[in-house]
Image (cartoon, rainbow, N blue to C red):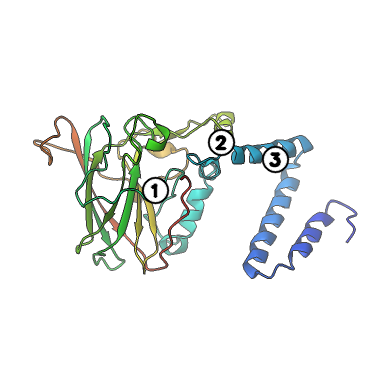
Amino acid sequence: MIIARQQDVTDVVLAAMDRAPSERLRTVMASFVTHLHAFARDVKLTEAEFEFAIDFLNRVGQATNDSHNEGVLFSDAVGLSTLVCLLNNGQDGATETAAALLGPFWRANAPPTANGGSIVRSPTPGPALFFEGRIRDAQGTPVPGVRVDVWQASPAGMYENQDADQADMNLRGVFDTDAEGRFAFRSVKPAGYPVPTHGPTGDLLRAQLRHPYRPAHLHVLAYKPGFKTLITQIFVDDDEHLESDVVFGVTRALIGDFRKGEGASPAVDVTGEWYNLAYTFTMEPGEAVLPRPPIK
């Protein structure tokens, strides 16, 4: 079809794509093009704005490397990551869920660690944290043999791949739940931190007068065949940015009860301030699929 006017463009593109043999591809791309073209018409997108958008997209790719994923960061900063997470968990978005976005800092192959062991692998100042987790199914039955991957930023607000002063895989570890569905580890209490702002996502935040901070949290990924992989975060309950998380990741179900310890700590080498955190996770039945690591 020869295009005679701007209203013809969308129909012509949809017709051209309709030959794709994959029904899902046809569905997704038809909706994407329809909404994208409607957006351009709605805001009356100028040529200068279009060129800026293409440059922004190119910069997202150029800012991505083995230790930083700008694409994930951008999707987080516009709320798309959290929206997709909530749409696909908690009975397809019908109920509150403990699932949360993966974030841009998960690494595969963290060190296997004994239950109760420490994930502090280089000197890391900050209050000690003793974590006790339990994993249950929807009926409340303990789930043994779950591979649990945990990772967090240091109290300085950086993941180890961002910080030359931290050992490789510091504050990362992999655990297996015992017969009662339990796992435990020792760490340090995490702190809030700014997301990286050196790339185009940072430019967007500054243009919108938004702060770049995430509230302090722990990441958990639980995997076992027969269950849907649970990806979640647990937030420190007194963090000042709980209600203004730059990536919109906080839900009520994810706020932990960080209790300041009293008296002698559970470890003889810990003096000063320390915290306990206990949390029970629920895994839904489904397909066990590991996500693609955002960084290497």
Relative to 293, is 183 on the left or the right? Answer: left
In this figure, which residue is indicated by the disc labeled 2? Answer: 201
Q: Distance between the residues labelled 1 and 3?
A: 33 Å
Give the structural element (helix, strand or loop) at label 3.
helix
Q: Distance between the residues labelled 1 and 2?
A: 23 Å
CB atoms at circles 1 and 2 under 8 Å apart?
A: no
**Residue in the image at 73% along x and 46% along y:** 40
In this figure, which residue is indicated by the disc labeled 1? Answer: 251
CB atoms at circles 3 and 2 under 8 Å apart?
A: no
Relative to 278, is 148 on the left or the right? Answer: right
How packed is label 1: few (under 14 Cα within 10 Å), some, or many (20 or more)?
Answer: some
**Dividing the picture into quarters, in which one does residue 7 lie?**
bottom right
In this figure, which residue is indicated by the disc labeled 3? Answer: 54
Numbered disc in front, either 1 or 2: 2
Sequence order check: which comes first, mark 3 or mark 2? 3
Can you give x and y, in whole percent of width and height, for residue 29 in the image?
67, 60
How packed is label 2: few (under 14 Cα within 10 Å), some, or many (20 or more)?
Answer: many
Q: Distance between the residues labelled 3 and 2?
A: 14 Å
CB atoms at circles 1 and 3 under 8 Å apart?
A: no
